[in-house]
Amino acid sequence: MTAMTLNDFDADAFLRDYWQRQPLLIRNPWRQWRNPLDPDDLAGLACEPGIESRLITGTRDALTAEDGPLPEDRFGRLDRAPWTLLVQAVDQHVPAVAALIEPFRFIPDWRIDDVMVSVAGDGGGVGAHFDHYDVFLVQGLGRRRWQVGARCDDDTALLPHDSVRLLADFQPTDEWLLEPGDILYVPPGVAHNGVAVGDNCMTYSIGFRAPSRGELIGGWADDLLAGMTDDDRYADPGLRRQANPGEIAPAAIDRLHALVTEKLGDRAAFARWFGEYASTPKYPEIDWSPETAIGVDDLDAYLAHGVALIRNPASRFSFIAQGAGAVLLFVDGESWLCEGATATLAVDLCADLRLTFDADRVAPGAPRALLLDLINAGSLGFDDRD
Ligand code: SIN
Ligand code: CO
């Protein structure tokens, strides 16, 4: 697998002028574009249990959606109606698709969701809609006509449809025909509509995520609640008599409000919770943990042979700097406070998807204990391609 890189692409200018602001068509910026997955292999994934997929047939008012896993003979029974097959998180199953994320890592990892892949027959598409997230739509194979329109929000009128969110009114403001290797960036909320022009139209959606305020408040409050005791409650020693016993006095409100905000406003505790929350894997069933836990001697033997470590593609790694060279490492919903050589190792694990170590680089003690934890949890594995 050759590394994919975006040439002739100015990431800084993109972030300044387009990211979260306006759509951008990027004409084939790859040195040599190679479609990373065969359409038949995508259809195969849609038949596997545990992989989220959807087959959409028909157009606009007469769209039907079938959720996977699909029966293997389903693709032989497609009639002449336009169709499109969508498979979620293909990066977690196909390394060549995961490699498509790397060029987009000028956006922080915690913002990246996954790569959805679609294949459509002539005229196929999911219809005009908007998403809440940024997306890079990479044309893999065949051609697709993309139109973009106005910015939408949760008040925008949708067609009455049970399972597909389609815009009731879509007025394109721009339109392009994408060829293999071309990329369309669409910011959150911007209406878009892609229609396959010819058969074997494959599109790779590098999708991002952005937590809603409600999700953050709910999740953070749940975490705080789990650590609360019943005796941590309102108290008012030194209470003064008030003119009207019916009043909830300003001093009481101050105390009550402080009870809530002291906890909710604890930035350090919030940061730890958020790191754990954001690193929780979406598809934990991709389990790499060894049948029997390995020990430090096994690890030493691998390191002595220069075997590389690779990250489980379903695992999420991030860190938060703590000052004085320490970092909080987050992997798959767990956190480790790392210092000194362990902090350096943690930062490297967050930067690189594949790492080779010599025994000297991973000092005995805490750094090796960290690697062992991550290997035994299935977040890291040995690269047996060596
Ligand atoms: C597609 O790949 O057909 C749809 C992607 C999208 O509109 O988000
Ligand atoms: Co979309």
Image: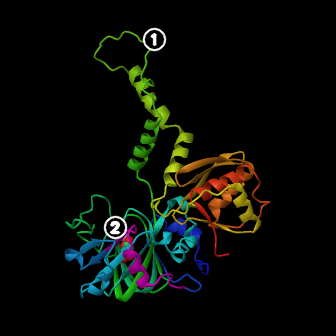
| Front residue of 117 and 299 | 299
Which residue position holds label 1?
A: 238
Residue 52 shown in magenta = yes
- Would residue 177 be seen by someone viewing this image from the given angle? no
How far apart marks 1 and 2 lie (CA) works out to 57 Å
Kind of residue at badge 2: Phe
Image-quadrant location for residue 67: bottom left
User: Where is residue 111 shown, x and y percent of the image?
Assistant: 50, 60
Image-quadrant location for residue 162: bottom left
Q: Neighbour class for label 1 at 10 Å: few (<14), some, many (≥20)?
A: few
Q: Is 204 drawn above or below residue 368 in the view shown?
A: below
Q: Is 148 drawn above or below residue 27 in the view shown?
A: above
User: Where is residue 182 shown, x and y percent of the image?
Assistant: 48, 82
| Front residue of 294 and 8 | 294
**In screen coordinates, is 156 left or right of 315?**
left
- Would residue 330 be seen by someone viewing this image from the given angle? yes
Q: Residue 130 carries which label?
A: 2
| Ligand 1 falls in quadrant | bottom left
**In screen coordinates, is 160 left or right of 83?**
left
Q: Which residue is drawn at 51% across and 64% down?
A: 314
Residue closest to the far right: 360
Residue 139 shown in magenta = no
Extent of the magenta region = 33-54
| Front residue of 53 and 5 | 53
Image-quadrant location for residue 209: bottom left
**In screen coordinates, is 25 left or right of 72?**
right
Q: Residue at x 59, y 73 (%)?
A: 10
Mark 2 C-beta to ligand 2 under 8 Å? yes
User: Where is residue 170 shown, x and y percent of the image?
Assistant: 27, 72
Q: Neighbour class for label 2 at 10 Å: few (<14), some, many (≥20)?
A: many
Quarter of the picture containing the N terminus is: bottom right
Kind of residue at badge 1: Gly
